[in-house]
Image (tube, rainbow, N blue to C red):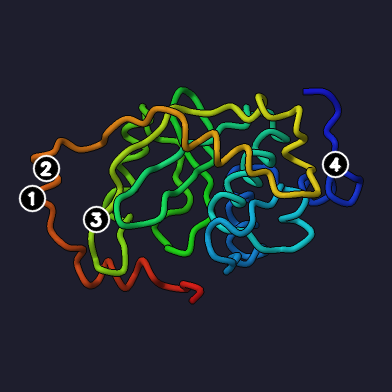
């Protein structure tokens, strides 16, 4: 990547985020959850830093930019759900294994250590934690990795306007089912302890 497009002040923030774990800590503790309804905002990483809030799409974009500053390719992975919101991760690979950075209103849908040998393994690690308020397990499909380098022409890292082209693109690409139809029919409800643990710290 050519010299990064951030200002010195923005660059100073990214310099502190020296590992994926530090990126996740920053998203969890320094960036509030964006309570705007889905479809209202899609902030670039620059706007996330300025406004200090992000929902999952915005958090994934920030995570991908921060990972890029560490030398990782800026990759997103999209999850599709039923009767629930979709979810987006910034993913990275270490020694051939996948991990993820994510922003979520649910505690179980955030960071994953880079220990998953395949993207399917990574996606399945979210399955039990991915539920709606009716306690249904809702995760169904996952995408291929999307390299955000393809959006460099719209300056996705520093745009002063919403970067809708990225989530719109994620809606067009093929997704792989995680479950067989017969397995879906047999799914139980989320255990009440996991349900309440997943909502810990949830912003209403």
Which residue: 27% across, 34% down?
Answer: 177
Q: Which numbered disc flags the more N-terminal residue, 2 or 4?
A: 4
Q: Label 4 belongs to which residue?
A: 6
Spatial CA distance of label 2 from label 4 is 47 Å
The residue tagged with tag 2: helix, strand or loop? helix
Q: Label 1 belongs to which residue?
A: 186
Residue 53, x across and y down, in percent: 66, 63
Residue 23, x across and y down, in percent: 63, 49
Give the farthest residue toward the bottom. 204
Q: Label 3 belongs to which residue?
A: 137
Badge 2 vs badge 1, beta-carbon distance below 8 Å: yes
Badge 3 vs badge 1, beta-carbon distance below 8 Å: no
Q: Which numbered disc flags the more N-terminal residue, 3 or 4?
A: 4
Spatial CA distance of label 3 from label 1 is 11 Å
Crowding at label 4, few (<14), some or many (≥20) Cα neighbours within 10 Å?
Answer: some
Which residue: 60% across, 51% down?
Answer: 59
Q: From the viewer's perspective, is 177 left or right of 148?
A: left
Q: Which numbered disc flags the more N-terminal residue, 3 or 1?
A: 3
Q: Label 2 belongs to which residue?
A: 183
Q: Nearer the viewer, mark 3 or mark 4?
A: 3
């Amino acid at each position: 990547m050519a010299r990064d497009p951030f200002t010195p002040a923005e660059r100073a923030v990214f310099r502190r985020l020296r590992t994926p774990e530090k990126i996740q800590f920053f998203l969890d503790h320094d960036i509030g959850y964006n309570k705007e309804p889905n479809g209202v905002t899609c902030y670039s990483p620059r706007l996330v830093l300025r406004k200090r809030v992000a929902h999952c799409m915005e958090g994934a974009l920030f995570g991908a930019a921060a990972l890029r500053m560490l030398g990782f390719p800026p990759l997103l992975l999209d999850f599709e759900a039923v009767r629930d919101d979709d979810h987006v991760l910034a993913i990275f690979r270490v020694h051939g294994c996948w991990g993820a950075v994510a922003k979520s209103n649910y505690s179980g849908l955030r960071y994953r250590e880079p220990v998953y040998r395949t993207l399917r393994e990574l996606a399945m690690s979210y399955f039990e934690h991915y539920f709606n308020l009716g306690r249904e397990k809702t995760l169904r499909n996952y995408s291929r990795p999307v390299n955000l380098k393809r959006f460099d022409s719209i300056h996705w890292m520093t745009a002063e306007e919403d970067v809708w082209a990225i989530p719109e693109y994620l809606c067009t690409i093929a997704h792989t089912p995680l479950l067989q139809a017969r397995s879906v029919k047999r799914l139980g409800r989320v255990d009440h302890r996991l349900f309440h643990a997943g909502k810990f710290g949830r912003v209403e």
